[in-house]
Image (cartoon, rainbow, N blue to C red):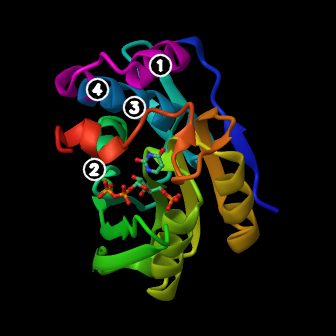
Amino acid sequence: MAKVYVFDHPLIQHKLTYIRETQTGTKEFRELVDEVATLMAFEITRDMPLEEIEIETPVSKMKSKVLSGKKLGIVPILRAGIGMVDGVLKLIPAAKVGHIGLYRDPKTLKPVEYYVKLPSDVEERDFIVVDPMLATGGSAIEAINSLKNRGGKNIKFMCLIAAPEGVEALKEAHPDVDIYIAALDEKLNEKGYIVPGLGDAGDRLFGTK
Ligand code: PRP
Ligand code: URA
């Protein structure tokens, strides 16, 4: 069964408060999302495999650990997921970036796919799918379906804010995908928005309405 991790680190919680706040403008919103993505990437990479190599310090030889070179891919769900990519790349600069374009039909709330471009060696990579919001879960489920249909196997999902409904739906659809969240909110409202949430992540990130 999928594990769900809620990152309650004080820095993440502090920055998330200002991300949520209505008065926070586009520039600051973008910067904060980027910073939280970096902090979450630090936590999410805890299980990265290491190997020992021999090095020489100015004093003696020693065996020391380095990352074992597992290939990684980051897949933002367009649009809003783009806001988390650079933050993750700060810690994993060699990762390749795929894109999955989905929008949520405002009436049915069902995801509509309009773009997919992934690294050519999908089968060899571990993936982190990123999107600030997990609301009904439809977009995340569809994006992960898309990735799996093209050969993606080891997948994690990372978001800023999740609704309980989305977490349950994603766990059920993809029990092999662990979920990493900065905050688990109360519920969805009648329009499918997360309450209290942060509003429309894509609009706040890109300054559109
Ligand atoms: C938002 C958000 C997620 C999706 C979450 O995207 O970034 O992708 O909604 O909702 P769900 O869990 O109910 O599917 P949106 O469809 O607004 O598109 P955008 O990023 O282009 O603004
Ligand atoms: N998408 C958003 O951007 N915000 C929500 O609250 C739900 C879906």
Which disc number belongs to residue 38? 3
Distance, label 3 to label 2, CA atoms, is 13 Å
Residue nearest the observer in this picture, 122 or 202: 202
Q: Please tell me in which quadrant of the rendered image residue 199 appears.
A: top left
- Mark 2 or mark 3, which is nearer the start of the sequence? 3
Which residue is depicted at the point 57% across and 75% down? 153
Quadrant placement of the N terminus: bottom right
Which disc number belongs to residue 60? 1
Our reading of the magenta stretch's main secondary structure is: helix
Distance, label 1 to label 3, CA atoms, is 34 Å
The residue range painted magenta reads 11-29
Q: Residues within 10 Å of mark 3 (few under 14, many from 20)?
A: many
Distance, label 4 to label 2, CA atoms, is 13 Å
The amino acid type found where label 2 is placed reads Ile
Q: Nearer the viewer, mark 2 or mark 1?
A: 2
Secondary structure under tag 1 reads loop
Rendering coords of residue 160 (x, y %):
50, 37
- Mark 3 or mark 1, which is nearer the start of the sequence? 3
Q: Nearer the viewer, mark 1 or mark 3?
A: 3
Was residue 164 drawn as part of the magenta stretch in this picture?
A: no
Q: Please tell me in which quadrant of the rendered image residue 87 appears.
A: top left
The amino acid type found where label 1 is placed reads Ser
Distance, label 1 to label 4, CA atoms, is 48 Å
**Residue highlighted by disc 2:** 82
Distance, label 2 to label 1, CA atoms, is 45 Å
Secondary structure under tag 3 reads helix
Residue nearest the observer in this picture, 81 or 134: 134
Distance, label 4 to label 3, CA atoms, is 14 Å
